[in-house]
Image (cartoon, rainbow, N blue to C red):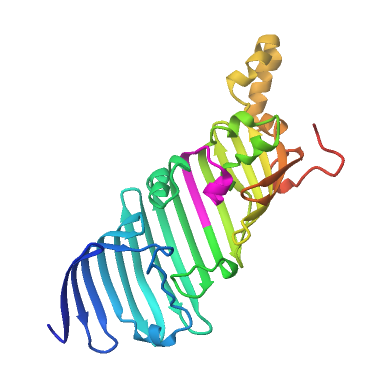
Amino acid sequence: PRDNGWQLGLNMKDIAGDVFWDTGGKGFVRADLKRLLLPAANQKGGSLDLNDDDSLLNSLPGLDIHVGDFAIGERHFGRLDVKAHNDGGLWLMDKVNIDNPDGNLQGKGQWKSGSAARTQLEFELEARDVGKLLDRLGFPGTIKRGTAHLKGDLAWPGAPTGLEYAGLSGRLDLDASRGQFAKVDPGVGKLLGLLSLQSLPRRITLDFRDIFSEGFAFDAIDARLDIRNGVIRTREDLHIDGPAGRILMQGEADLRQESQSLLVSVQPEVAGVAALGAVVMAHPVAGVATIIANKVFQNPLNKVFGFQYRVSGSWADPQVEKVGTSVGAAGAGPAPAGKENK
């Protein structure tokens, strides 16, 4: 016993460190832990149902927790700092910070329980190495290298421990650079597999097999997304720029059904000296004029040699249909029916 509370010293396999439990008022817990290893949701004792229980929410104490090594199942997230307090039945997460050598997550939010249970979360993620961070989160071998900044606000019905895709809503803004999608099946990497577009070379016999087969390297990814009832929609064209070409996507993906309806514009990079060398050798004057015009008009040849595709069906078994040549952004729309350019 100490200062109207209890001082605890813990040294167990899954938790170790010092905890002070202040029993005054609604209670307050301060903890400085060396490690906190929680079971995964599918492990025995790992599920925690916090929904529809106002008495539980009202009894939750305030928290000021520091953990040196925080893990859930086999996933080690690194250092964790959490501050939260109870405000009249509304549990406010004032600070959530997770930091490790591969990235940093900062966020805040709130949770209301009962019949109108709802969780809201605002967050900002800086990935110092996207590939290693995804390895840490349980998606090994999906991306090589890369940095990224992901900012968003999300809300879903229920408790923080149970993300409900059917009612998930919010916004996401992603900027990534200098990485490479690994050669993975779209059904394994989920949305990452969808972005990598490796379904294209499996479904067509020409055009861009060399660009996507071994994993598309990207210089930059720019995505602005809205989420409503578990369906992600592009607010504007999603851009992926890389040494081999440019990709523009628009449409939607259903998180619950794991399906998509996308229009994808692929513009291969043909503006380099190697691509135009033959023209220069055969017709020097015309070749030089072509190179100059190509630069002045921002690589129009990329668009001339590009195509558009309609991607639908499930993430694991996407259906890809070529709908015409690519002119400008994906927002330009597909070629009219019967006018497809072979």
Q: Is residue 282 left or right of residue 9?
A: right
Against 253, residue 160 (above or below) is below
Residue at the image position 35 percent from the left and 63 percent from the top: 39
Instruction: Point out the residue furthest to the left here.
Output: 2
Q: Quadrant of residue 321?
A: top right
Q: Is residue 33 visible?
A: yes
**Magenta stretch holds residue 144:** no
Q: In this orientation, which residue lies closer to the viewer: 1 or 330?
A: 1
**Quadrant housing residue 285:** top right
In this rendering, position of residue 325 left or right of residue 161? right
Residue at position x 52%, y 56% in the image: 173
* Marker count (numbered): 0
Provide the residue span drawn in magenta. Answer: 173-193
With 79 as the anchor, is 155 left or right in this view? Answer: right
Furthest residue to the bottom? Answer: 25
Q: Between residues 335 and 137, which one lies in front from this camera angle? A: 137
Residue at 49 percent of width and 65 percent of height = 153
Horizontally, is 275 left or right of 21 in the view?
right
